[in-house]
Amino acid sequence: MANLIAFEAAARTGSFTRAAEELSISQPAISHAMRELERELGVTLFQRRHKGVETTDAGRHLYEQVSLGLTLIDQALGEVRAMTAGPQVTLAVSTATATWWLLPRIARFKQQHPDIELRCITTDTDLDLGRERVDLAITLGTGEFPQHQRWHFVDEEIFPVCSPAYLQAHGPIADVQALTRASLLHLEERYRPRLGWLGWLARFGVSLGRNTRLFRFNDYSVVLQAAIEGQGVAMGWRHLVDPLIAQGLLVRPVPQSVTTDQPIYLVASRHTKLRPEAVSLRDWLIAEARMVALP
């Protein structure tokens, strides 16, 4: 189990060093754990690079399953604690929103509301909030919400992002047209329509070239990780990538941006009155989103 926890951290961060820092152990301990795990499984999980590591196909598959398993374990532990804990509030978000938006901020919520237990469900589908006992969910707006109350969370603003290393290796991208000659990291949305490269480029009168290299993923967390590792140019949703840009992990290769007519909303069941702890979470989420939106 300890090796699997170390593996998850290394695969998620793309670095044995960052995984070691996160787990408060030494980098050699991470390396040893990964060698043990690879020897036990009989497969190579990582390709060692000059700057960090990259998961192999087997490593990516294991990461997806281990990450899901750890999430379920964490949720189960939270539910058990909740049996004797104070008030609990449940939030449903996508995996990417949980990883890149919520987790870096959750300590602030706990500091402001130490008596509220936050239970987070990660899902890329729209849940029946009442049946699943979910207080709030963050979802892309596609029209009216007859079964839900809703509050504006953020506008859906999308622009290209890539790592500084990608630009250093491949040269600057002069304009939108030049993006068609780059390696494009594409999200294949399985459950709801999202603006992809074809639609984004069309807003600027540009079509995908016949020889454009398009790498497809079905998980936006993986798309962003691939962009950070320098594998290509990704579509960046502003509320998710702005912190990564501020940290220097990603840059905007061109200044163009598209804001769609489908904002991202906080929603709750229309048939259930929000409990006080859910109101506190709603107000905190909206306040955090407004802080991000400030120039």
Image (cartoon, rainbow, N blue to C red):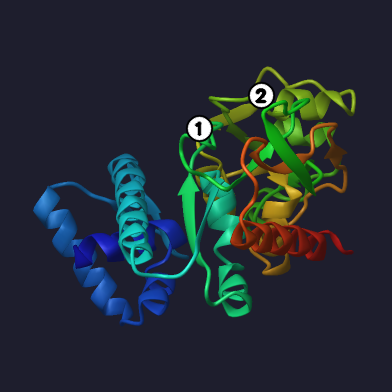
Mark 1: amino acid: Asn
Q: CA distance from mark 1 to mark 2?
A: 13 Å
> Residue 50 at x, y = what percent?
44, 64
Whichever of labels 1 and 2 marks the residue nearer the N terminus, that label is 2
The quarter holding residue 8 reads bottom left
Image: 136 above or below 248:
above
Image coordinates of residue 73 in percent, x first then y, are: 29, 55
Q: Which residue is painted at 67% across and 28% down in the image? A: 147
- The quadrant of the image that shows the C terminus is bottom right
Q: Which mark is residue 13?
A: none
Q: Nearer the viewer, residue 109 or 71?
A: 109
Q: In this rendering, would 37 be left or right of 86? A: left
Q: Quadrant of the N terminus?
A: bottom left
217 left or right of 279 in image: left
**Does the CB distance between marks 1 and 2 fall below 8 Å?**
no
**Given the image, on which type of amino acid does mark 2 rest?**
Pro
Q: Secondary structure at mark 1?
A: loop
Q: Image point 44% across, 72% down: which residue?
A: 18
- Residue at 50% across, 45% down: 222
Q: Judge from the rendering whether residue 232 lies leftward or rightward of residue 46; answer left or right.
A: right
- Between 276 and 258, the residue placed more toward the observer is 276
Label 2 SS: loop
Measured along the vertical axis of the image, is residue 136 above or below residue 100?
A: above
Q: Assess disc 2: are there few (<14), some (14-19) or many (≥20) residues with their C-alpha within 10 Å of its C-alpha.
A: few
Residue 67: percent from left, percent from top: 35, 51
Q: Which mark is residue 193?
A: 2
Location of mark 1 (residue): 218
